[in-house]
Amino acid sequence: MTTDSQWVACWGNATSISNRREAVYAKDLTLRYPIRMCFSGTMLRFRFSNLTGTEPVTLDKVFANHVAVTFGGQKSVTLQPGTETESDAISMAVRSGDTVEVSMYMAGYTQMNSGTFVTGPLSKGYYAYGDYADANVLPQDLSRSTNWFYFLNTIDVLTSKDNRAVVCYGDSITAQSWPDYLAQMVFGTNTAIIRRAVSGTRILRQYDCITYQAYGLKGATRFPIEMNVAGATDVIIQHGINDIIHPVGTDVNPFRPWSDLPTVEEMEQGVENIYVRPAKEQGLRVWSGTLLPIYGWRTYNEERETMRQAFNEWLRTSPLFDGCIDFDKAVRSNSNPKAFADGYDSGDHLHPSERAYEAMARTAAQYF
């Protein structure tokens, strides 16, 4: 590495527990993920994660645009449960805007437990039955698209020291489209957008039942791992709505007791101690992201709305943060600030529409 270059993350997802369905194993399977490069560079390295797996996972072949990805010089790698594994650096000249297709083949029975569901214009993968890791194209009759990203966690590029990464940390709202739109808006600058988001995740709690395991690890467990991002300078934290809306009482749902409902002060302390202080110790700037409207959501009530408003006021005014990205203001109705603006509700009264995700990205883009 030359003195005028550094490793910078150019793409990344969180790793969580994949949704528990009848089939949790795969065999003779190829995964392929096309990733757009946001920077030019001379070398790439790849991190693969079996963080939430309970069994070893063997990737028999890994290719990036037909170049073999190796691990300690070997062309296959076994990812141990609860660990993340970085590849050897490979020589590959890339230019900003290029697409790098990362393909991996798993011959034997493989526990598909480490994966995250994400959406957006830049987030789509494919799988195929059979060994097509080094094929030019996947056979149409044996392949399908997927928004589940398994094992592939981060891609770093050896690039200019002027380039940097901004981390978007959160739950399903961040696992959906706004980070992709933000990445499109800042494309051509010196900034990569790295998504670290898991649907359903909370700051202070996590589920250990198979019904809700895909909702991910709690903040204290997630954050130290997910902030392993080369070249990161900033983190945007848009997190906490699930702490507010999930508890309903064990008479309604045995996995969602009222004891899980935190106070606003506990949420604030959690954000400060779990997120802000460790991020500052890493030398990062920390941006708060306000929580979006929930009026009409199935567990909405005035108590939860009062909590959301109080937490948002803290996010806007606390001197702990380097700034506040007011997502709530960007998508709420002027006539009823508890609700989404017209056309900005996906229909469930919790998740934004695509138009709203674009509005969130525009709000964030002005700072980067």
Image: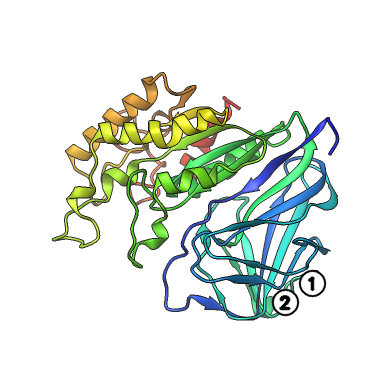
Residue at image coords 75%, 44%:
157
Circle number at residue 16: none
Q: Secondary structure at mark 1?
A: loop
Q: Which residue is mark 2?
A: 139
Asked if residue 13 lies left or right of residue 337, the reply is right
Residue at image coords 72%, 77%:
139
> Which amino acid type is marked by label 2?
Pro
Do the CB atoms of the residues marked 2 and 1 lie less than 8 Å apart?
yes
Asked if residue 274 lies left or right of residue 139, the reply is left
Crowd around label 2: few <14 · some 14–19 · many ≥20 (10 Å): few
Q: Quadrant of residue 239?
A: top left
Judging depth in this view, the residue of 263 and 332 nearest the camera is 263
Q: CA distance from mark 2 to mark 1?
A: 9 Å
> Which amino acid type is marked by label 1?
Ala
Relative to residue 357, is residue 265 depicted above or below?
above
Residue lying farthest to the left in this orientation? 251
Percent position of residue 126, x then y: 64, 67
Residue at image coords 78%, 42%:
158
Q: Is residue 123 visible?
A: yes
Tell me how many marks there are: 2
Q: Which residue is mark 1?
A: 135
Q: Secondary structure at mark 2?
A: loop
Quadrant location of the C terminus in the rendered image: top right
